[in-house]
Each structure stands twice: as C-alpha cells, then as structure tokens.
Image: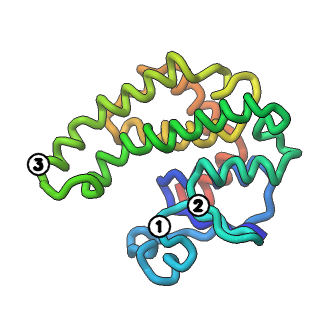
Amino acid sequence: MLTLFHAPKTCALASHIALEEAGATYEGRLVDFGSAEQTKPEYLAINPKGRVPALVTDRGVLTETPAILPFIAQTHAAAQLAPLDDPFAFAELLAFATYLCSTVHVAHAHRVRGYRWADDPAAIEAMKTKVPETVGACFALIEQKMFRGPWAMGERYTIADPYLFTIASWLEGDGVDPAAFPQVFDHRRRMAERPAVRRALAMEGA
C-alpha cells in the first residue's frame, strides 16, 4: 500500500488530491511542521530532504511533486489523469508541472523561505517585497499562455489541475490578487468543489 507523508498548506496537497482522484489505496501521514518533525531522524530516514511530499511505495520512496504525480497517473491508468498514450501530450503535461515546481513555487518560497538564499535580514526582506511581482508574473504567463481551459491542459482533467490548484491557493498570501487571473481564479473555484479535493482538504484539517 502507498503511504503519503504530507503537511497542511504545502505542495503535498497536489499529490494528496491526485491519490483521491485516482481512487488509490493509500495511507496519509501528517508531518507536524509545527514541532519540526520534518527535521527529526525518523522522518529524515524516509526523506533526507526534510520536506513533503514523500510517497512510500513497494519499490521505495518517491519525492518531488513532478515525480509523484506522473507515478500516480501511470499506476492508476484507469483514472485517466494523464495522456499516457500520447508521448508529446504527456511531455507537455510534465512541462506544465515542472514550471509550477521550478519557477512558481520557488518564487513563492522567497516570501517564506528567504533564508535558503541569503543570511542578511535586509536581503531576505527585499526578497519578500519582490514576491507579489514575481509570483504575479508567473501567473500572468499561466493565465495568458499556458492555461488552455476549462482545465489546465484543455478539455481533459489531469494531474496538472491539483498542482495548479494547490499553488494558486497561495496567491493571497503572496500579495497577489487572484481576480487578476480570471481563468485561474475560476479553475480554483471549480477545483474546490470537486469531491476528491474536499476529501483531501478535510484529511489535512483545512
């Protein structure tokens, strides 16, 4: 059975939703960031990166959302969460997910994890100040060039949708008005109504 290690208000929500959408048999394990459980030897033995998500499988542990989401789609093909029969479309889907991970999430992290890049308090504060601009620019690109509608990749719901929903839920905290991105805003609203999303959020106490 799969075990997902996750924490509320983190990118692990995307994998949690995907497991629910796939109808997967899994166990959810909350990692208590409040007590820094992610830094304890017990959790570091599972994920030495000290982050979530981590997905324990019968072949080992997977980390990083752009790896976990395709794994869920491929191992639960009946749920049709990815165009597995079309290599180009699948690569496009991975490109979307990778952008969310490598660019959008990193821009967001400069507000809450500035210490990863600088020690100078003034530099960290400058990074925080820049976040509304950088995150806003990321979502402008998604809104204008990447989002196909009605779902992220077009007519078909895919693993990109819970990932976009998760990161778009941080917009207000990043000082960005989601109403500036009508398609993304509407997508977030529709995602919040999906039963799988509601179940995942309830299990995370959100």
Q: Name the residue under label 1.
A: 49
Q: Mark 3 points at which residue?
A: 122
Q: Distance between the residues labelled 2 and 3?
A: 33 Å
- Residue 92 placed where, x, y %? 66, 30
Identified at 45% across, 72% down, the residue is 38
- SS for dot 2: strand
Q: Residue 63 carries which label?
A: 2
Identified at 63% across, 52% down, the residue is 67
In this rendering, is residue 196 above or below 96? Answer: below
Number of numbered callouts drawn: 3
Residue flagged by tag 2: what amino acid is it?
Answer: Thr
- SS for dot 3: helix
Q: Which of marks 3 and 1 is nearer the N terminus?
A: 1
- SS for dot 1: loop
The answer to which of 146 and 136 lies nearer the viewer is 146
| Circles 1 and 2: CB atoms closer than 8 Å | yes
The crowding category of the residue bearing disc 3, from other C-alpha atoms within 10 Å (few below 14, some 14 to 19, many at least 20), is: few
> In this image, 50 relative to 23: left or right?
left
Q: Earlier in the sequence, mark 1 or mark 2?
A: 1
- Residue 165 placed where, x, y %? 56, 38
